[in-house]
Structure formats: structure tokens, C-alpha cells
Amino acid sequence: MSDRSRDFEVIVYGATGFVGVLVARHLAGYAPAGTRIALAGRSAVKLEAVKSQLNVDWPILVADSADQAAMATLAGRAHVVITTVGPYAKYGRALANACAAAGTDYVDLTGEVLFARDSIDENHELARGTGARIVHSCGFDSIPSDLGVHVLHKLIAADGAGELTDTTLVVTRMQGGVSGGTIDSMRNQVDVLKKDPTLRRVAASPYSLSPDRQAEPKLGRQSDMDTFPASEVDPSLRGRLAPFVMASYNTRVVRRSNALRDWAYGRTFKYREAMSVGASPLSPLLAVGTKLGLGALIMGLAMPPTRFVLDRLLPAPGTGPSEKTQQAGHFTMDIFTVTTTGARYTARVRAKGDPGYAATAVMLGESALALALDRAALPQSEGGVLTPATAIGDALVDRLRQAGFEITARKL
């Protein structure tokens, strides 16, 4: 049941952007009849065009992300605000703060660790006071990771099989393009770190999003850039594993979920993510090549000559693949863990659709609908800067399953 004291259940801010249109389209097709939704952005003309394209009668709201008063007004009119306007470090701080102050739930797509850290510092206590659930990273960053570990932990707890220890997410299959918005966020973070090198320690820390860094367990080195044999994760796996481009953010979100739950996953819960490069004789070379390629991309964005070239080769913000390409995309993520009792468990999160576009639109849209319409099913919370698992949990798992996602867990 939604809160009828606000004008809208959901406002989609950034509704004229590439991903914003996809999210609005998903809501137009799947939100229950009568759900009060508005489209928001900087241009009334562009918003009217999206409204016409979707054939909806939703109101349009004009607001600039740089206008704090406009963001406060926007936040006060909805139960949930969706924002697709990034890089969030540039364009998201005012809106997140306004939602925290207004007691309005908020969801975004950020994969920017420095922005998320700043938001925690600025908004967590404020949102706890107002009851707002500020939920970053409700797309491919980082719902599959966060909900995958959530359902894994839930099954292990139900079985009385102890706590999670060494846990690894393996991207076993994936097809899809890299979002121009994701690339732009990477550019922005590189620029911030160049201006203020002291922030590198924050960005590099495996517990950069922890609510209490000093209370975190001492588990030794936790790198997101290793290559290693797949059999090290589980005896059933073959080949070599390479670094996964989103691991350096997703792992921090999952660790925050554990800490927010008073380390319910376990005090010796050690989490990493990797990507399968197959089991051919060339897999060790492919794994090393992937590692070097990711490092080269970051270095290239940091150096003006190569930055100039990369800016012309990489996807631009606001662009994306064709509808056909989006629908052909897919991803499968398998998570493996060993518990403190020695039992082995696995979870799987799988969906059709380009991960960063079609599937992300579903994840973000359903996150907002769960917050707006499924209040009784949400985890108990005082509010705050939360994670998908701690803010929405099973309500989102159920909605995504209904939307065609496979989210399962089992004992091996």
C-alpha cells in the first residue's frame, strides 16, 4: 500500500535520458493500474516527447539538479524518487540530500564509490531520522551481487548451516554493451582522484562503504584484480577466472549489507567477484589480458593524450544500443560459498536483456515499485543510506522473479 499523502508514488528524474526512457517504459508497462507516476527532468519539451512516445498521461515536472530548492520540492511530492542522472558525484548530491531530508525513498544506478561514501556521510543519520530509505546502486551495479548473497545467506540460515566464509561471485555468462553513463562515471572518478590523491585510500579500501570501518574484521588482503583457477572457487568449475570490471564497487556494497545486518553473513565472510574466461588452453592468457586491459583503461582515462582518444572511441553519455541488441543481451552470475560448518552452497542470478540497459531498467523500476507499494514486505529499518538487500530485500526478490529473473539458492 502506498502513502497517499504525497502527490505521486514514483517520480522518474532524468526521464529523457537513454536509461531514463527505458525505466519509464518499464513502469508504463508493468506498474499496477492507478500508480501515480510523474516524469521529471530539465526540459519540458523533451519530457512531453517521452510522454507522447510512451502514450501515458503522467504529469511532467521541470527541475534542474543544480537547484537545491527545486530538488527539495521534487522530493517532497513523491513517496519514491528514481534518478538516472549521473555522474552522481556531479549531479546527484542535491537530490539524495533532499530525499533524505524529506523522508522520501530514493533509488539510483550509481557505481561511484566516492559518491556513495559521501552520501553515507552526509545523509545516513539524516535519513534515519526521517525514515527515508536512500538506496544507491539499484541496477546491474549492484542488485545481482547484493540479492544473490542475500538469498544465499537466507537459505544457509534456514538450514542452520553456520555462517558464510569464503564467497565468490562468478560471472559465468554475459552479453551486453558498456553503458556510456558508466564510462562517464569512471571518467569523473578518475578526475576526482587526480585532483585529490588522498581519496585514493578511500576508493581502494575493501570497506570503503562500511558504516564502521574500525569494527570490520581483519581478513587480510582482498583484491579485486586477481586471476586464479576456477577450481579454487568450487571443484565443479574449470578454466581460469579474470577480474570483473564491476567488482571493485559491488564487493563494497555486499560488505556494507553484511555490516548493516550486524555482520549476519559472518565475521569471517570474505567476498570477491570474478569473471569466467572459459576453459580453453588460452584461458590463462585471456585472464591476464583482461586484468591488463582494465588497468590500461583506468590509466588511459587518467592521461590526457590517451584520454583524448578514448573519449572518441568509448560510448558517450546518453547513448546506448539498439532495441534488438538490448533484447539479445543476458547475464548469469553464480555465487559459491563455504560455511563455517564446512557445507557448500551456491546461488544463481540470471536474466535476459542487456545487463546495463534492458535488465537494469527492470531492476531500477521494480526497486521503486517495491518501496512504494510493498511497504509491509520490506525489511524492518529506521531508514538511512541502505543497500538493495537491506532496504528492499525479499520484496525485490519476489518482484524480479515475477519479471522473469532467476534468483535461486541451493546446497551443493
Image: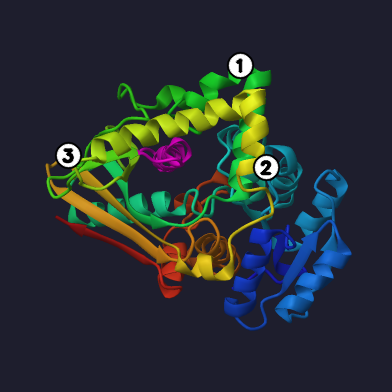
Residue type indicated by callout 2? Tyr
Q: Nearer the viewer, residue 36 or 212?
A: 36
Q: Quadrant of residue 348?
A: bottom left
Q: Which residue is mark 1?
A: 197
Q: Residue at x 51, y 33 (%)?
A: 209
User: How far separated are the C-alphas under marks 1 and 3?
Assistant: 39 Å
SS under mark 2: helix
Residue type indicated by callout 3? Thr
Could you tell me residue 106's position as x and y percent? 64, 53
User: How far separated are the C-alphas under marks 1 and 2?
Assistant: 20 Å
Range of magenta residues? 243-263
Does the segment drawn in magenta span residue 249?
A: yes
Q: Quadrant of the N terminus?
A: bottom right
The answer to whether any part of residue 115 appears in the image is: no
**Whether label 1 touches label 2, CB < 8 Å:** no
Q: Which residue is mark 2?
A: 88
**Whether label 1 touches label 3, CB < 8 Å:** no
The label on residue 340 is 3
Image-based side of 90 in relation to 28, left or right: right
User: How far separated are the C-alphas under marks 3 and 2?
Assistant: 39 Å
Of the two numbered discs 3 and 2 on the same chain, state the one appearing first in sequence.
2
